Amino acid sequence: MPSLIVHCCTWNVGDEKPGSEDLSSLLGVNSKPSPDVISVALQEVCGDDAWRQKLLEHLYPHGYVLIKSRNCWAIWIFSFLKRNLLPAVTNIESEVTASGYAGVMGNKGGVSARFELCGINMIFLSCHFTAHRENKQDRLNDYIDIIDHQSFRDEDVNVIIDHDYVFWMGDLNFRIDHLQKSEVELMVREKRFSELLQHDQLLNMKNDKLLFHDFNEGTISFPPTFKFDKGTDTYDSSKKQRVPAWTDRILYMVHRDFALDHHLNLPETNRQRQASPSRRLPVRGSPSEVEEKFPANKSIKGRQHPEAVLLKYTSLNEYKTSDHRPVIAVFKLSVPPRWFSLPVKFIEPDGKAYSFNTNLEISYQVLDPPGLLRLSETNSLLSSKQYVPVSDFAKLLLLNTPGHSSKSGKSGSTNDDDLGPLAPPTLQTTSFDWIALYPAEFADLEKDYITYVYASSNVSQTKHRKNSVSSALLQPPNKAKFQEFYKARIESSRLKDLPGQSFCLVYMSRNKHCPQGYSLPFKLQD
């Protein structure tokens, strides 16, 4: 079973702009294996562009691309992905829930970034709840507001807790009840964390099923992360004498009812789409609890699948610029052995060199369904390389071509290798879709485009006999079919300042607000 490494970090930066400190530990870039996904939750951000640039400076040299960012005033979420996984990500969205001062100022609340990667969907939240020990009910209301008010365009996964993997991060501001500052500091010095956690508001409210009752959290074996005198290891020495607390947390939820259990059978005698038996009901909870309830035995139909494995959960004491310490969590997530590629396949440009003195002619197809990526074809998509050169990226983008059709076993039976996920809905193209020109090794999906043109509604047709997934699913084998090609053009006047550089095209969907296809990298020259 293939897997992804996901690195989560949350940090209330205390209105401090980034300094000269090395963020490698915070971002996990030197870990072995290196993360496939890095999600950074920041609170009390002053100068969002400065933090954005700081993160890009650290992550771009290691082969990561910023695919989504979102903020609610000083609350930010940044999601990065290994470059070689770009063809495997879709349905990128974000949401905002503002609270604090009647929700007008948005100094408290939560932001989220969600996407589908390698056939599974995940969501990351950055939240800042109401402060002060006595305001437990307000923090509960903050949680409920975010759960109730965030929704997404994906009809199958349109609320937070419907996602396969949910990662809830932030300065949740839950405090220690019934103890004085001196008592807490003594217990911290003696590392009596389990005893101290008996007074933790979040854990007690969670045990009472008031909030996060479907979530799990790793063992807390690190000191309280709040509140420090900035630049020191001393807990609050001001007149306020705030009691130390674990305000900064990362919780996660696993939803077992994901694409691994939803298959498409393709008998030779009937090439129409047929859904296999229904998936099991979703079971939420930590891996150990779920596996106790659902042991791997023959009484359960369908294959058993491992869930999220928590590899690390700790705070980072070396970062002292804020009055909070950052917290990180590292997970190993299982993903399906096969998933569908992005639906847009570029025919031109095809990876060769083009003149910047002439118009760049573009042609592409919208595959329905897209190519099915097999495990044997996509091992490199899940590699742990820290840096992916253009040549390797080009090979990975070739995976956007359709795979081979499945073959049925004898007597109508199907082998495990003949099963695949249900095909996604047909991409609904519009005249407001656009094709963007990017540097071949761009760092920021949201900001690095150079120019763009609107996608064309003009269609040309060519007879095509190749037996691909797209043809095999929809009609009998070997039957000729007309395939539709769309055309667009970038005028040479937009290219005149770009000679000698390498680029790629990205098809952006207006409906999905995210990429639906990448071209091969190509060069512009005289």
Image: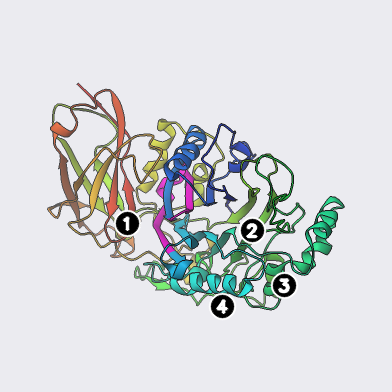
- SS of the residue under disc 3: helix
Earlier-in-chain disc, 4 versus 3:
3
Q: Is the residue marked by circle 1 packed among few (<14), some (14-19), or many (20+) residues within 10 Å?
A: some
Residue type (three-letter) at the residue carrying disc 4: Leu
- Which residue position holds label 4? 281
- Which residue position holds label 1? 513
Whether residue 426 is visible, yes or no, is yes
- Which residue position holds label 3? 204
How far apart, in angstroms, are the residues tagged by discs 3 and 1?
A: 40 Å
Residue type (three-letter) at the residue carrying disc 3: Asn
- SS of the residue under disc 2: strand
How far apart, in angstroms, are the residues tagged by discs 2 and 3?
A: 14 Å
- Which residue position holds label 2? 249
Q: Is residue 74 above or below residue 35?
A: below
Q: Nearer the viewer, residue 73 or 67?
A: 73
Earlier-in-chain disc, 2 versus 3:
3
**Quarter of the image that includes the C terminus:** top left
Earlier-in-chain disc, 3 versus 1:
3
Q: Nearer the viewer, mark 3 or mark 1?
A: 3
Dominant SS type (magenta): strand
Left or right: 430, with 47 as reference point: left
Q: Is residue 81 magenta?
A: yes
Earlier-in-chain disc, 4 versus 2:
2
